[in-house]
Image: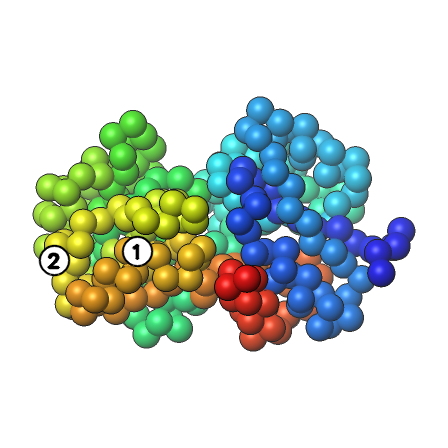
């Protein structure tokens, strides 16, 4: 039962109707007997500052931040965790007695998912698609693990990729190519790559008939990670599996980053199995 003592957490983004984070977190709160509730809040970009101000006024305990606000929310916060500052994107906010502090749990969730998928990133080569908040977390996590990479993004936002590549290169000291996302550049970049990461929203429901990579560019020996978790098996993952690649879906990353956020809000490690089961059941309807 929700009372005046119930702690409120939530998700801000646009869209949020597809998200299974509320089901996932509320299942964990219930399993642990915590007086918390997690709610989704659709916030358009022009209202982001007002939404953060409203969260302060309502004393909301914590928030997750998703597309398209992970970068734009940063200057609205009081403090940034060093990892979030380095990545340049925030996906988790903690209200610490009125101080709104931003964290990035996407990076940790991504590396946990890679490990569960049996992929050891050290010394490997990767191709990352996208240059938004999720891509920033992925690229810095890979760079910190000793991975060489190329970043590809659509022509309209190529400057995002150029900026991200410069930031990652400054951190790791390696040259990071930033290229337009097209078949020719993909073919060249994937020729000697060990890992392909789709950190865009291409293929997300309801547009699950779309893929960012032509099927003929997928091959055995390549691991393919799709951060999209709805649907559980995207077209990219289905075609990659048919091509003989190792595939890792976004659900493991979703649960991993969510668990890290949960612990930041409550100080308690959540039951990962319950979170994942609730999320999968919600997706399957």
- Rendered-image quadrant of the N terminus: bottom right
Q: Are there few (<14), some (14-19), or many (20+) residues within 10 Å of tag 2?
A: some
Secondary element under disc 2, as helix, strand or loop, is loop
Between 72 and 205, the one nearer to me in the picture: 205
Q: Are there few (<14), some (14-19), or many (20+) residues within 10 Å of tag 1?
A: many
Outermost residue toward the front in this view: 285
Query: In the picture shown, does residue 281 fall above or below 172?
Result: below
Q: Position of residue 43 (x, y in %)?
A: 60, 34
Q: Position of residue 17 (x, y in %)?
A: 57, 45
- Rendered-image quadrant of the C terminus: bottom right
Left or right, 7 with respect to 145, comes to: right
Q: Quadrant of residue 282?
A: bottom right
Left or right, 173 with respect to 45, comes to: left
Residue matched to label 2: 192
Query: In the picture shown, does residue 52 fall above or below 105?
Result: above
Q: Position of residue 3 (x, y in %)?
A: 88, 54
Q: Position of residue 195 (x, y in %)?
A: 24, 60
Q: Quadrant of residue 110?
A: bottom left
Left or right, 26 with respect to 179, comes to: right
The residue lying at 37 percent from left, 50 percent from top is: 208
Secondary element under disc 1, as helix, strand or loop, is helix
Query: In the picture shown, does residue 50 fall above or below 197?
Result: above
Between 182 and 284, the one nearer to me in the picture: 284
Tag shown at residue 235: 1
The residue lying at 18 percent from left, 39 percent from top is: 182
Find out whether the residues at labels 1 and 2 contact each other: C-beta distance under 8 Å. Answer: no
Left or right, 266 with respect to 238, comes to: right
Q: Would you say residue 227 is visible in this rendering?
A: yes
């Amino acid at each position: 039962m929700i009372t005046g003592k119930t702690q409120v957490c939530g998700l801000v983004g646009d869209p949020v109707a597809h998200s299974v984070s509320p089901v996932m977190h509320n299942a964990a709160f219930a399993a642990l007997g915590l007086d918390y509730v997690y709610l989704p809040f659709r916030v358009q970009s022009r209202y982001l500052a007002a939404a953060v101000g409203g969260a302060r006024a309502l004393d909301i305990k914590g928030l997750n931040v998703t597309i398209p606000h992970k970068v734009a929310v940063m200057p609205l916060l009081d403090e940034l965790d060093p990892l979030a500052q380095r990545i340049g994107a925030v996906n988790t906010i903690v209200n610490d007695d009125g101080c709104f502090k931003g964290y990035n749990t996407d990076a940790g969730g991504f590396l946990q998912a890679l490990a569960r998928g049996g992929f050891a990133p050290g010394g490997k080569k990767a191709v990352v698609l996208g240059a938004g908040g999720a891509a920033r977390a992925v690229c810095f996590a890979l760079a910190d693990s000793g991975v060489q990479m190329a970043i590809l993004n659509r022509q309209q936002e190529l400057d995002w990729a150029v900026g991200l590549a410069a930031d990652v290169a400054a951190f790791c000291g390696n040259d990071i190519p930033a290229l337009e996302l097209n078949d020719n550049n993909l073919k060249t970049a994937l020729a000697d790559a060990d890992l392909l990461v789709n950190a865009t929203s291409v293929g997300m429901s309801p547009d699950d008939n779309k893929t960012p990579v032509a099927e003929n560019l997928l091959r055995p020996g390549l691991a393919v990670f799709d951060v999209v978790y709805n649907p559980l098996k995207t077209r990219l993952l289905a075609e990659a599996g048919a091509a003989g690649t190792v595939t890792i879906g976004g659900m493991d990353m979703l649960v991993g980053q969510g668990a890290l956020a949960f612990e930041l809000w409550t100080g308690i490690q959540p039951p990962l199995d319950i979170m994942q089961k609730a999320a999968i059941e919600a997706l399957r309807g």
